[in-house]
Amino acid sequence: MTTCPFDQRPADVSNILSRLKTLTSAEEFFAALNVRYDADKLATARLHILKRMGDYLASDDLDGLPDGIAAARARAMLQRAYEDFVGSSPLKQRVFKVLKDHDPKRPVAPGQAFVALDDILAPVKAD
């Protein structure tokens, strides 16, 4: 497991919400919130993890909370989002709309049938 650079000391929680809004990479989020991660897992699921964290954050209003509490909640949400992908894959988790819309386990709505390209290109069988 790769550790973030700040792993051995407490994360700086001052103005954490405004600082989180300025971060641009997954590694920056993990470092700012002092969350450990495996570099290989992060490399394959970074956008999915951050999207899932965003979904979790959207369900909790952190505005107006003391910095320490907001940081602890954001850290827990990032850790939870990361753990969602440790034993799973982006394809199984389906956090993005395009993956949700094409879930083979979900029935297709009438008028929205999907035909795979392989089916279209398959040779026509003569009767």
Image: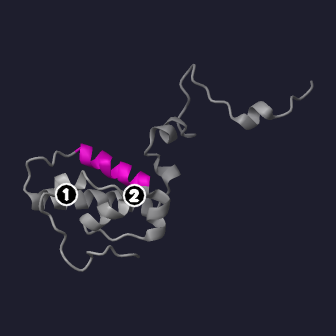
Q: Which mark is residue 73?
A: 1
User: In the picture provided, is 108 more to the left or to the right than 16?
Assistant: right
Please tell me whether mark 1 sits on a helix, a strand or a loop.
helix
Q: Which residue is drawn at 13% across and 57% down?
A: 15
First-in-chain label (2 vs 1): 1
Q: Which residue is drawn at 32% across and 52% down?
A: 53
User: In the picture provided, is 19 more to the left or to the right than 48?
Assistant: left
User: In the picture provided, is 68 more to the left or to the right than 98?
Assistant: left
Residue 108 at what x, y percent from top left?
56, 29
Residue situated furthest right in the rendering: 127
Q: Is the magenta stretch mostly helix, strand or loop?
A: helix
- Measured in 3D between alpha carbons, the distance from the residue under mark 2 to the one under mark 1, in whole angstroms, is 16 Å
Residue 44 at what x, y percent from top left?
50, 60
Q: Which mark is residue 63?
A: none
Q: Is residue 58 above or below residue 77?
A: above
- Can you identify the residue that label 2 sits on? 84
Q: Residue at x 44, y 63 (%)?
A: 42
Q: Does the magenta stretch include residue 54?
A: yes
Q: Residues within 10 Å of mark 2 (few under 14, many from 20)?
A: some
Residue situated furthest top in the rendering: 111
Amino acid type, label 1: Arg
Please tell me whether mark 2 sits on a helix, a strand or a loop.
helix
- Work out whether residue 5 or residue 69 is closer to the camera in this orientation and state it: 5
Residue situated furthest bottom in the rendering: 8
Residue 60 at what x, y percent from top left?
20, 46
Q: In this view, does 49 lie above or below 124?
A: below
Q: In which quarter of the image is residue 83?
A: bottom left
Amino acid type, label 2: Asp
Q: What stretch is highlighted in magenta?
A: 47-59
Question: What colouring does the structure picture have?
Answer: one colour
Q: Residues within 10 Å of mark 1 (few under 14, many from 20)?
A: some
